[in-house]
Image (cartoon, helix red, strand yellow):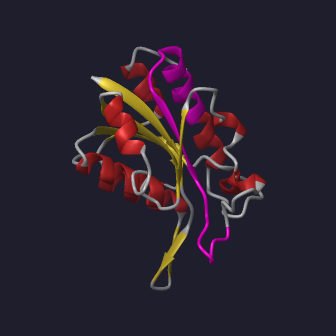
Amino acid sequence: MSKALIIVDVQNDYFANGAMELVGALQASENVKLVLAKFREENQPIVHVHHLGVSPDATFFLPGTEGAEIHANVKPLTGEKMVVKYYPNSFRETDLLEHLQGLAVKEIVVTGMMTHMCIDATTRAARDMGFACTVIGDACATRDLAVNGAHVKAADVQTAFLAALSGFYAKVQNTQEYLAAEGLTA
């Protein structure tokens, strides 16, 4: 089965002093880096997804800013596919589906940011399009949220969204479990 790594929005604005700092972004990016190294070593397809905030009310990922740039831990190499997106779902109005189909990819491994938004939307869309999905939970990051006056800690947001994806939509693993299943350790 052909497999591809999808790295969603690991961009500077999500890190310390960024415009939309996430909880655990640096550690998540270190885990993405480990999975990325495995895909590079095995010469498997890699797709870097790069979100740009172009709506009039956008406050982060503004085009041309350092915050919108891909983080140094996962910088694309020459020849690795880049997909620019403007919505949470990495397939919406991009060539991601066509690219994966052109490579006969049947399974995707999803990493990146934000778990409750772009990881969730991308994984659900991928599964609906027939891809087998694995989400590397500790290679994703999110933030605290609020709803109806209640404050939800990032750890609880992360757990809830990964639990919701686990099963029908995706196999959820941590980095070490994934690498061990692939016969590697970090």
Image vertical order of residue 146 relative to residue 41, above or below: below
**Which quadrant does the N terminus fall into?**
top left
**Which quadrant does the C terminus fall into?**
top right
Image vertical order of residue 134 relative to residue 177, above or below: below
Image vertical order of residue 100 relative to residue 156, above or below: above
Residue 41 falls within the magenta-colored stretch = yes
Residue at horizontal 69 percent and vertical 56 percent from the top:
13
Residue 101 falls within the magenta-colored stretch = no
Q: Which residue lies furthest to the bottom in this view?
A: 149
Closer to the camera, 88 or 144?
88
Which region is colored magenta?
Answer: 31-59
| Residue 13 visible in this rendered orientation of the protein | yes
Percent position of residue 33, x then y: 60, 31
Residue at horizontal 62 percent and vertical 56 percent from the top:
23
Q: Would you identify the image quadrant in which residue 98 lies? A: top left
Percent position of residue 57, x then y: 62, 77
Residue at horizontal 41 percent and vertical 28 percent from the top:
177
| Residue 172 visible in this rendered orientation of the protein | no
Percent position of residue 165, x then y: 31, 51
Residue at horizontal 67 percent and vertical 70 percent from the top:
59
Q: Would you identify the image quadrant in which residue 30 lies? A: top right
Q: In this view, does 102 lie to the left or right of 55?
A: left
Percent position of residue 154, x then y: 53, 61
Q: How many labels does the image show?
A: 0
Q: Is residue 134 left or right of residue 143?
A: left
